[in-house]
Image (cartoon, helix red, strand yellow):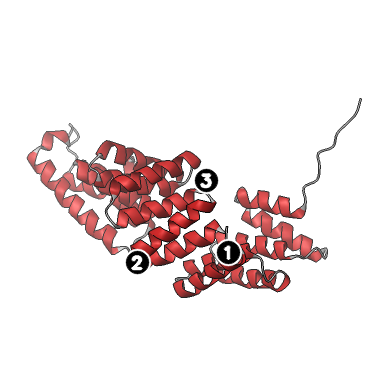
């Protein structure tokens, strides 16, 4: 009988596996150990930079990406990663510069094309943004982020049917990304398909209950359907997560007013034998969930 041992993963494969599984702290620890053992490469710096990027520390990631570039100055994926870091630091011009460098070294860098599209979208240059997003599709038709950017551009230009179609394509690629559902929630609300909108909004919250915008879109969908109680609850939860957002506050006050009017017009729908007061329903709706 022959026994087979599982092949030991290379450092790069192990790093990619940890990154894909969102094991960012474990990835950093793994690569720091490799560095201590003298195993240093552009890839080890690159993957460590990606881990810090996903942990929300863009400055730390940029420092590591620069070290990677010192070892591999023509590696397109490093330039793309740096572009993304600058993008999330709101340095769009710098981000665009690095995305274009990435494309210069590798014409097939779909993530770089979509990065340029995002920069143009932020600048409200939607025609340019759409062109760059479509270029990205030429090189990668299986990237949900590309379809998300396309959908976002269509949303901003009020082409909601087109937006719904590309978000559906994104969801066929991956079904566990909350912002795809929250964006779909908004689009179907604008198409006045409120039940579908609410369904997608609820799914976004299920996937990421710590994202305030998921509750915000869900609250909007319920408001437009006329379910003001659920709308109030959602906006209250959004504010619980982001207490300084003025838009959330404005929508909460509007939903409370609509709910109060609804209670006044049809009190039997909101009261039972315990004589629950309307202000208690409005102010403490989240105690009972939804």
Placement of 192 over or under 272, stated as above or below: below
Mark 1 closeness class: few <14, some 14–19, many ≥20 residues within 10 Å = many
User: Where residue 147 appears, x then y in whole percent?
Assistant: 44, 50
| Residue situated in front as seen by the camera: 119 or 265 | 119
Mark 3 closeness class: few <14, some 14–19, many ≥20 residues within 10 Å = some
Corner quadrant of residue 263: top left
User: Where residue 69 appears, x then y in whole percent?
Assistant: 67, 71
Corner quadrant of residue 198: top left
For this orientation, the residue located farthest to the top is 1
Q: Mark 3 sits on what residue?
A: 142
From the viewer's perspective, tell me whether residue 24 is left or right of residue 212. right
For label 2, the SS is: loop
Mark 2 closeness class: few <14, some 14–19, many ≥20 residues within 10 Å = some
User: Where residue 230 appears, x then y in whole percent?
Assistant: 26, 42
State the residue at coordinates (77%, 61%). 33
Query: Is any atom of residue 97 visible in this view?
Result: yes
State the residue at coordinates (63%, 73%). 63
Q: Which label sits on residue 38? A: none
Of callouts 2 and 3, which one flags the residue occurring earlier in the amino acid sequence? 2
> Comparing marks 1 and 2, which lies closer to the viewer?
2
Of callouts 1 and 2, which one flags the residue occurring earlier in the amino acid sequence? 1
| Distance in Å between CA atoms under marks 3 and 1 | 19 Å
From the viewer's perspective, tell me whether residue 56 is left or right of residue 71. left
For this orientation, the residue located farthest to the left is 265
State the residue at coordinates (11%, 46%). 261
Query: Is any atom of residue 228 visible in this view?
Result: no
Q: Mark 1 sits on what residue?
A: 81
């Amino acid at each position: 009988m022959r026994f087979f041992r599982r092949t030991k993963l290379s450092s790069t494969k192990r790093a990619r596996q940890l990154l894909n599984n969102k094991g960012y702290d474990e990835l950093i620890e793994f690569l720091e150990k490799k560095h201590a053992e003298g195993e240093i490469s552009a890839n080890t710096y690159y993957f460590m930079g990606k881990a810090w990027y996903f942990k929300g520390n863009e400055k730390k990631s940029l420092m590591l990406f620069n070290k990677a570039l010192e070892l591999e100055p023509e590696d397109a994926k490093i330039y793309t990663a740096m572009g993304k870091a600058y993008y999330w630091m709101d340095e769009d011009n710098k981000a665009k510069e690095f995305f274009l460098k990435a494309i210069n070294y590798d014409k097939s860098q779909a993530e770089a094309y979509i990065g340029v599209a995002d920069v143009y979208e932020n600048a409200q240059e939607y025609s340019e943004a759409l062109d760059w997003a479509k270029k990205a599709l030429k090189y990668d038709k299986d990237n949900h982020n590309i379809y998300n950017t396309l959908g976002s551009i269509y949303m901003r230009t009020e082409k909601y049917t087109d937006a719904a179609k590309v978000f559906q394509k994104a969801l066929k690629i991956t079904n566990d990304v909350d912002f795809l559902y929250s964006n779909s929630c908004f689009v179907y609300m604008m198409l006045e398909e409120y039940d579908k909108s609410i369904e997608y909004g609820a799914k976004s919250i299920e996937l990421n209950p710590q994202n305030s915008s998921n509750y915000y879109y869900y609250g909007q969908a319920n408001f437009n359907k006329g379910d003001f109680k659920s709308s109030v609850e959602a906006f209250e939860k959004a504010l619980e997560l982001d207490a300084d957002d003025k838009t959330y506050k404005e929508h909460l006050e509007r939903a409370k007013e609509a709910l109060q009017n609804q209670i006044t017009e049809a009190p039997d729908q909101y009261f039972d034998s315990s004589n629950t007061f309307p202000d208690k329903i409005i102010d403490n709706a989240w105690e009972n969930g939804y």
